[in-house]
Amino acid sequence: MANERFDLVIKVGGEGGEGVITAGDFLTETAARAGYWAVNYKSYPAEIKGGYAQSTVRVSSERVYSTGDSFDILCAFNGEAVEKNMVFLKRAKEESKPKVLVYDSTDYQPVEELENVIYYPVPLSELAKDVMKAYITKNIIALGVLSELFEIPEKSIKDAIKAKFMRKGERIVEMNYKAFDLGRQYVRENLKKVDPYKFPAPQEPQDVVIMEGNQAVAKGSIAAGVQFYAAYPITPATTVGNYIVNDLIKRGGWLYQAEDEISSLGMALGASFAGKKAMTATSGPGISLMSEFISYAGITELPIVIVDVQRGGPGTGMPTKHEQADLFICAFGGHGDFPRAILAATTVEDNFYLAVEAFNLAEKYQIPVFLMTDGALAIRSEVFPTPKVEQREDGKIIVRGQIPYGVEEIEVVNRWIYNPEEDKEGRFKSPTGRFLRYKTDTPDGITPMAIPGDPNAIHAITGLERTENTDPRFTPEIRVKQMNKRFRKLQTLLREDAARYYKDMRIDSDNADVAIISWGLTASIAREAAKRLREQGYTVNEFYPRLLWPIKAEVFEEFASKAKRVIVPETNYHGQLAFILRATTNLKDLISYVAYRGEAFIPKEIEDFAKMAIEKDIKKGWFTPSDVYGTVVGAI
Amino acid sequence: MAVLTAKDYRSEVEPTWCAGCGDFGVLNATARALAELQKDPAKVVGVSGIGCSSRLPLFLKGYNAHTLHGRAITFAIGVKVARPDLDVIVFTGDGDMFSIGSGHNPHVARRNLDITIIMMDNKVYGLTKNQISPTSRDGQYGSLTPYGNIDGHINPIMYMLTFGATYVAQTYAGNLKHMTKIIKEAISHKGLSFVNIISPCPTFNKFDSYKYYKNHLIDINEDLGHNEIDNFNKAMEMAIHWDDNYRDPNNTKAHIGVYYKVEKPTYHDRVKEVQERLGREDSIQNLINVCKPKAI
């Protein structure tokens, strides 16, 4: 894309309701319109009204997956935004690049001049109130300021403004243009640029979309052909439903707002039994409530997709905070033994494609499939290449794009429905003609389903252990055969499908200084840390599996054998993935590197820890960033 | 299609109930009602929870689902919303529906889903061997309340009327004819129908026996002249009347009959309106492309 490498992090912070988040969205869209990539991490206030909000937008000439260690430019809508970010501003003196503080001088005056920080005071509130006579234009004035200071392409940003406001009429667009121009004019007349940051010239825009994490889950599910979505509001999963509802109805499906999460999964399973692709999305507490039905889905072999947009636990925990602490409940929650699969997304783009894959696994294997994301991914937006969905005449649907985990395309899978024409020899019929829904002797463990309305395969389902023709029966022979049938499906999954989700692996050396295995959002941050380590001369192997259950041990074992040490960074206390890997593979010497403060890692924390592990020759154990820095650091 | 008889609606699975269980009667009446309506067994979905009564769908022919304790209604809603062409019948009991599963009752009723709920009320937990339920009588002995029930009881009819069910009736497992008629009406009703069936448990509830009901049943429509069945206040009065009597088991009449029946748009009627209003999008790509920066 760009000739020169360009990478800039702009953070906008202020009072919720002042258009902070909108300003971040504009910057993201501007980047896309100017032909660059962007990722925008939003942080909404936890309070219902007001409270601190911020948006961190990283714009780059290359695909980026994290918002980096810190910002280059802070645009502070009030004093609180400056105070909240003081820790980063103070760190500027240790950094090679300066930090820029653009602040609302109506609200704030710096008490001290920090080293290596460049100050641009702009009376944002005053300009909005006194000149524009409309306080709501404050964020647009700020965009004008940023545009003039950092050469953010005027046309791209104005197009983004127009796209947002054109529905409200020409007058509103004009007012916002005026506010934008006012910001630019203020800079020209009052400020002198002394910082090195500038946006490169716009280039031909790529064919891209801008999606939020939960939106990508919704769109991917639509591509997969979901027809029923059961919703119960819970932060941060609610917006999956918000995003899917209209699309779903337009595709002939329906979203049902349930009375609780138990109902959500019950309803989704009812719809699945009735022959439709069904899903629900929730967060940790909802998964706890659903556990009984998850187990029921396991024994009745009903396809179902459960999206877990994780939040900080336990209990009510920290609903608006980032954490990856639900791997245990997704892998082991629900009573009894039953097969299931877990896919975990590392980026917003992943969310889209893995939603399709989750339905594929659920429908093919007739098991509950979890798609794990988290609250930070849920509200982060990304610019990424537009996914392409081909709907063929024959009904086949093929999903293509730059699929981040390295597969070429995804063909949408539909469940195996019993067809008497294909069963002339009566393989799935008892001597008396009853349908054998759970025949135990298929080599892959998969048996055809039948949906209500088909007179050839009438059968009941039950959560009780049962015979091949679904009568309740608990004899040891039947029990063992049915159990083996169900778990044979997982062996088939490992054999036929697991490799798809293990492609995001990079081997620098057969004896690398360090290897990193990570999952979810942390993987996207570890990726950047690995890149920096490599630039410093270390050999780094990386593995970001998208399939977290079942585990194909030999893949992990072989990967780990090629490095002197393996670090598993993740944001939970136990080191849940490392815990599972120690249990399911011969890898006992894994280094858990965990953070459980409610914030994602920043790349530097993984980079610094990796260097410490190399220097001190650490091979195993459990560490946190405090072990590196001697203090708890929040990476806001 | 050949004319189907009641036995065509029975599965090969033999009931596991105790001899004399009222649920046998409910099974027979349901099969008869389905036969009289000539329903296609492949398009009848019976859904149940857990309990003696919840075994019933396994003994019926159809795409039936024996689900979790208290959760039959949730599963049934999923089936019905996904496939409005199916007849969905929930088979449940007093513990299943009004204890563990009670949170679902208001919501299925207020939305007027076109589902039939048949509750077999034996006033006791039978499958777990004699514990009191939300409909147990005062002083009734249970294994966890050996001192006699002090918990108070609820009136399922009043609840379901309050929640907005559009067909509410009560019948008795010892009266096959009345039961068949009521179940038939309930299945044919467009909207949420609730049928409470007094179903004696000869093993654990000795009080509510066939012998007792022989002398205590009264038909609210025929004997008490409750004919304005579309009048909510009258239906409620009748339900309260039954409840008052219920508190004094030695001087009581147990009701059978239709309390309430009214036609209202079903949930599916409203869904169809919304679907028509929003229209259809055949291209998945178009739904993705709305996430591109808008052309200016």
Image (cartoon, coloured by chain):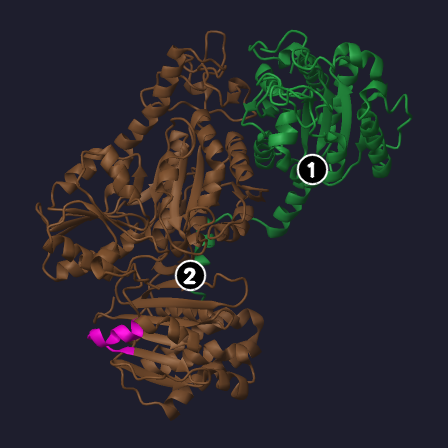
Chain colours: A brown, B green
Asked whether A591 or A212 is in front, the reply is: A591
Q: Is residue B32 left or right of residue A22?
A: right
The answer to whether the residues at label 1 and label 2 have Cβ atoms under 8 Å apart is no
Q: Mark 1 points at which residue?
A: B109
Q: On what subunit does the disc labeled 1 rest? A: B
**Is residue A113 in view?**
yes
Q: Which of marks 1 and 2 is nearer the N terminus?
A: 1
Residue assigned mark 2: B292
Q: Which of marks 1 and 2 is in front?
A: 1
Q: Quadrant of the N terminus of chain A?
A: bottom left
Question: Callout 2, which amino acid?
Answer: Lys
Is residue A90 covered in magenta? Answer: yes
Q: Judge left or right: residue B208 versus residue A586.
A: right
Place of residue B210 in the rendered image (x, y in percent of width and height, measured from the top left): 76, 11
What are the residue bounds of the magenta stretch?
A88-99
Name the quadrant of the C terminus of chain A. Answer: bottom left
Count of numbered circles in the view: 2
Q: Which mark is residue B161?
A: none
